[in-house]
Amino acid sequence: MRPWNFSAGPSVLPLEVLQQAAAEMTDWHGCGMSVMEMSHRGKQFMQICDEAEADLRELLAVPDDFAVLFMQGGATAENAILPLNLIGRNGSGKADYVLSGSWSSKSYKEAGRYGDIAVAASSGEAAELDGVRQAPFTWFPAAETWRVRSDAAYVHLCSNETIGGVEFVQWPDLAGLGAPDVPLVVDASSHILSRPIDFSRAGMIYAGAQKNAGPAGVTLVFIRRDLIGHALPICPTAFDYVNVAEAKSMFNTPPTYAIYIAGLVFKWLKRQGGVAGIERANIAKAQALYGYLDESPFYANPVHRPARSRMNVPFILADESLNQAFLADAEQAGLLQLKGHKSVGGMRASIYNAMPLAGVQALVDFMQDFEKRHG
Ligand code: PMP
């Protein structure tokens, strides 16, 4: 049996997908070539890419007025590609950012190279919430508190902070915040395809693939078509959304193998009952793990309950001197990559779509046993 892999990304892929890719490795559907060896303009790869886009659209019910782009450079490059494309949209040169953790802070810093960037809201300070003192970046700033400039070209947030384990899904109607013309732009890298998305609330959504959608190397971009076509003159040609959209993600050679594997993941997701089906599984997994964390005095999750991520579950041991022993024993038990991000310490279990409930159960069983031995 393979070990359970709780890596935050690149992360576990469905075994069925890996097995299919292995079976097709040297000869895709009898054409005598690996997908890696095909021309991206040939009919085989065009079919792979078209199907991947169609399946992705179906899974997330992407409206027709959104373009779906397969890009490169990861979410990190998108942090620059986004202002390069959108900040010139309305002549203000302004964009506002909600800071909720490491990743949104990085996005904010990068955007500062391209315009007048302001903080709309931040959870970078400790706060008293529901009678509990929440440490910085363990909570999400409520939409009512955001200050969005009405002439901002967009407002950005990260809807799942992979390191802090903070998720935000009630995307606000910006008209209610006095900014009806400001589109919401969302970095959804670490929870894309784990639950439905309300496209009526967003202008653009982007996500690196290497958590829930496939291997590293392809970035998924969903952008409302009216937001395309405003790139700054310094925007690299290959990163201008107009060019990428017009060429159907083939402006230059796309990451063909990563798109192919993502396409297999999309088909696997459809077999799981689509996003609704995988969401049910994700809820059950999150309940199993948080339920145990909450009942045990030995472990704790530091995140404000309404903002807890279903995908990334950080936790600490009451006695941190046991951290090394916990990690070593976990690895022995076939539970890999549980070390928390170095910036926050502790542990983190990433329980993405491809992690089955059995894996989460194995983790909880191990944690119980460790608690018995050391508690
Ligand atoms: N945003 C989020 C929410 C992430 O989790 C990550 C990667 N862990 C990134 C951005 C950066 O992604 P990449 O390394 O693909 O550039």
Image (cartoon, rainbow, N blue to C red):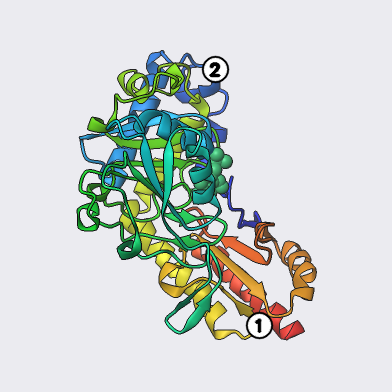
**Ligand 1 under 8 Å from disc 1 Cβ:** no
Type of the residue with mark 1: Phe
Q: Residue 186: x, y in percent?
A: 38, 47
Q: Residue 212: x, y in percent?
A: 47, 48
Mark 2 and mark 1 in contact? Answer it, CB < 8 Å: no
Label 1, secondary structure: give it.
loop
Q: Which of 86 and 197 is in front in this view?
A: 86
Type of the residue with mark 2: Glu
Residue 271 visible in the shown view: yes
The residue indicated by pointer 1 is: 298
Give the answer, above or below, for where 373 lies relative to 256. below
Q: Nearer the viewer, mark 2 or mark 1?
A: 1
Give the answer, above or below, for where 213 lies relative to 141. above
Q: Residue at 59% x, 73% y: name it.
A: 364
Image quadrant in which the N terminus is located: bottom right
The residue indicated by pointer 2 is: 37
Q: Which of 73 and 287 is in front in this view?
A: 73
Image quadrant in which the C terminus is located: bottom right
Q: Which of 197 and 334 is in front in this view?
A: 197
- Label 2 crowd bin: few (<14), some (14–19), many (20+), radius 10 Å: some
**Quarter of the rendering containing residue 66:** top left
Q: Is residue 178 left or right of residue 146?
A: left
Q: Residue at 45% x, 84% y: name it.
A: 131
Residue 19 visible in the shown view: no
Q: In this view, does 183 lie to the left or right of 48?
A: left
Q: In this view, does 20 lie to the left or right of 7?
A: left
Q: Nearer the viewer, residue 114 or 261?
A: 114
Q: Residue 124: x, y in percent?
A: 52, 62
Q: Which mark is drawn over residue 114? A: none
Q: Residue 59: x, y in percent?
A: 31, 45
Give the answer, above or below, for where 181 lies relative to 128. above
Give the answer, above or below, for where 312 lies relative to 116. below
